[in-house]
Image: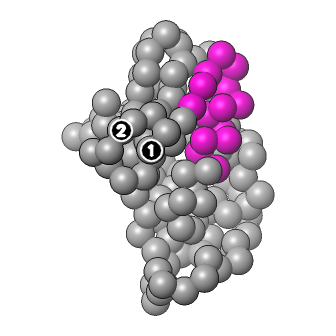
Amino acid sequence: MRPARFQQLLLDAASALPGAAAKSFADAGHARHPVGVAVEAGGRKSLWQIVVVGFPGESWGAADPEPTLGEKPALLELPTVTSDLSTVEQALVAQLLATDPGEIAAVEIYSTRPNPPAVGHGATLDMHDGSKVFINHVR
């Protein structure tokens, strides 16, 4: 999975949320982080950084590889998006899973963990090609 391709997947997922609008960081004028999505939903704007760790042996200079598909994780119920950031986080992941053709092998949502990481909201997605995608709320 490449960052630019995942950014487009996340943009499409966020734009499909009822009452939401989404832009890439570049289109939203956010330059602090190179790749991510600005989402306006539930009466607030939130910024979601994307970090991708390539699969073992991947060459970032090579052409974008064909997607590796496999068994999809269970779908999540799409929550109603409110001003609570957890609902935006969970809705983004639910919409990603609903539109995923089978590239996502597993997902972990940060706010639902017993001890959420310092970033608080976001998700780690394990991809069938061996790469990992981190979606981190940054503001």
Q: Give the spatial CA distance, label 1 vs label 2.
A: 6 Å
Q: Residue 49 placed where, x, y %?
A: 39, 46
From the viewer's side, name the closer residue of 10 and 25: 25
Would residue 94 be seen by someone viewing this image from the given angle? no
Residue at point 65%, 16% (across, down): 19
From the viewer's side, name the closer residue of 31 and 65: 31
Residue at point 53%, 75% (across, down): 130
Q: Which residues are magenta?
A: 9-22
Q: Which residue is mark 2?
A: 30
Q: Which residue is mark 1?
A: 26
The reply to whether the magenta stretch includes residue 20 is yes
Q: Quadrant of the N terminus?
A: bottom right
Q: Residues within 10 Å of mark 2 (few under 14, many from 20)?
A: some
Q: How many marks?
A: 2
Query: What is the secondary structure assignment of the residue under circle 2?
Result: loop
Give the side of residue 133 with respect to residue 20, left or right: left
Q: Residue 110 placed where, x, y %?
A: 39, 40
The reply to whether the magenta stretch includes residue 10 is yes
Residue type beneath disc 2: His
Please tell me in which quadrant of the rendered image residue 51 appears. Answer: bottom left
Q: Residue 105 placed where, x, y %?
A: 62, 62
Residue type beneath disc 1: Ala
Check if mark 1's residue and mark 2's residue have beta carbons within 8 Å.
yes
Is residue 26 placed above or below 42 in the rendered structure? Answer: below
Residue at point 54%, 60% (across, down): 4
Residue reaching furthest bottom? 57
